[in-house]
Image (spheres, grey):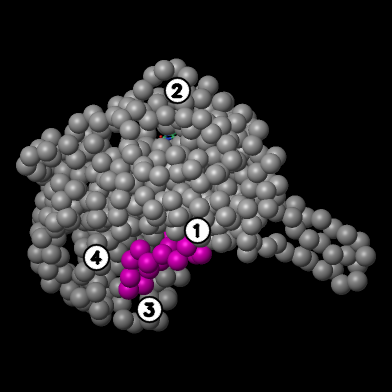
Amino acid sequence: MTLQAPTHISNYIGGNFQAPLSGKYIDNINPATGEVYGQIPDSNEQDVQAAYEAAAAAFPAWSKTSAEERFKVLNRIAELIDANLDSLALAETNDNGKPLWLSMNVDIPRASSNFRFFATGLIHFSTDSHHMEDKAINYTLRQPIGVVGCISPWNLPLYLFTWKIAPALATGNCVVAKPSEVTPMTSYLLSVICKEAGLPDGVLNIIHGAGPNCGSAIVKHPNIKAISFTGSTRAGKDIASIAAPMFKKISLELGGKNPNIIFDDCNWEKMMRTTVQSSFANQGQICLCGSRILIQETIYEKFKEEFIAKVKKLTVGDPLNEASKQGAVVSKLHFDKVMSCIELAKQEGGRILLGGNAIHPEERCVNGYFIEPTIIEGLGANCRTNMEEIFGPVVTLQSFKTEEEALALANASDYGLSATIWTQDITRANRIAAKVYSGIIWVNCWLLRDLRTPFGGFKNSGVGREGGWEAMRFFTEPKNVCIEL
Ligand code: NAD
């Protein structure tokens, strides 16, 4: 098969590629050029209802399909993603603005890994048994929930979409899924792949549209019993307020404002190289980016000087150009938000050490949404710049004297997604790792991911965990069966 990104994309419902029932579309914009290059369905609750009906009709057969059969079809999807790496990566870059080399090396390979990982997981998934001496045996059944909803954001489009869909399908559920309306193309292409791979019709339904119309109709649907959501804390709060009184299972992976804690005994070279990445990878639009850099006072000036010099070398430009280390931010709306955050930082007394401006690369990207990697210092822990998620190429520097001060700064945020600790003193690293209120801690590394580990955040960064058995458990209902002996 040859995958091609069309200009008009369709919903995928019950195995059919169909237009939104309202006939309405939303513009799809390439953020690197600022040009409209396609149309996506502006779906509403009627499309969600149709998707639900298709999923409910497919559920009895899919939930009884043998583990071996589910394994085979999910693996076929992984193989087809790999076989179409080039077209998927190009589609991701055109939709999102990220450098093509990043889509080729990270986003798309990770999407096939997600399918392969959960395909393998499903044939190893087992449940508990509790023996009450000579009185009874309990065993736990884990049954699929039924029809579940998966809603994902724009920053790692296919990567995060498949991170939800794969475990939901692996555990025998049928899915109504919605990618971000800002980056819909690779999930549309995934629907073409699923059809080709032989995933039975209705098992996965992918509908496109905006959050308030389409996303919220999935959340409100009385028979969609679980919602796995990744996105902003604001939308997570709305979703929780709707889903909680309906007693739906929810998994919420939300925002972050992650500390990157650097002690003076760190491995300098590795810390510096990794900190440039953890600050600005994907234009700073990774929920795990370390946007608050906390540096021990003894090395603050040295760090600042070398960090600025290194970040200056990050070429910002056309994402299709191999030399571009940074591409465009995802949309005009997001560009305006990030620029207003930089303005706010100035008003709060922040000193812009580097960047702070929009960039207009030449030729086809002159109207794109590009922002210079920006480094700010001189702000306290409790100002809005250091409390609110910016989700762009912007970091702040703060200094600390002692371990206690570092911990207080790290924990000053309302978020608690991830943290990075740089020190050669392993006892100190373990001590701090235990005391930082974050779901994911990296010591002397960043973004090193083992898909078996629990993934998710404390505080306003979310509820529940994804990854490994956590995801398989989320998408199943445990049922205890007690047999008296
Ligand atoms: P967003 O919340 O605006 O949108 C995410 C998805 O939810 C989109 O598909 C959107 O259409 C939909 N949506 C929006 N409002 C909704 C509502 N009321 N009901 C149902 N669906 C709704 O987020 P975004 O701007 O696409 O993504 C950026 C955010 O995602 C950042 O805050 C980032 O930190 C977060 N994020 C978190 C993780 C994580 O694992 N914790 C990973 C990636 C991104």
Residue 447 highlighted magenta (yes or no): yes
Instruction: Give the numbered dot on residue 275.
Output: 4
Residue on which disc 3 sits: 428
Residue on which disc 1 sits: 116
User: Residue 267, relative to residue 386: is it above or below?
Assistant: below
Whether residue 279 is visible, yes or no, is: yes
User: Where is ligand 1, by quadrant?
Assistant: top left
Q: Amino acid at mark 1?
A: Arg
Whether tag 2 and tag 4 are in contact, CB under 8 A, the answer is: no
Residue 154 x/y as whole percent = 35, 42
Whether tag 3 and tag 1 are in contact, CB under 8 A, the answer is: no
Which of pointers 3 and 1 lies earlier in the amino acid sequence?
A: 1
Residue on which disc 2 sits: 20
Q: Amino acid at mark 2?
A: Pro
Residue at left offset 27%, top offset 61%:
278
Instruction: Give the numbered dot on residue 453.
Output: none
Judge left or right: residue 227 versus residue 113: right
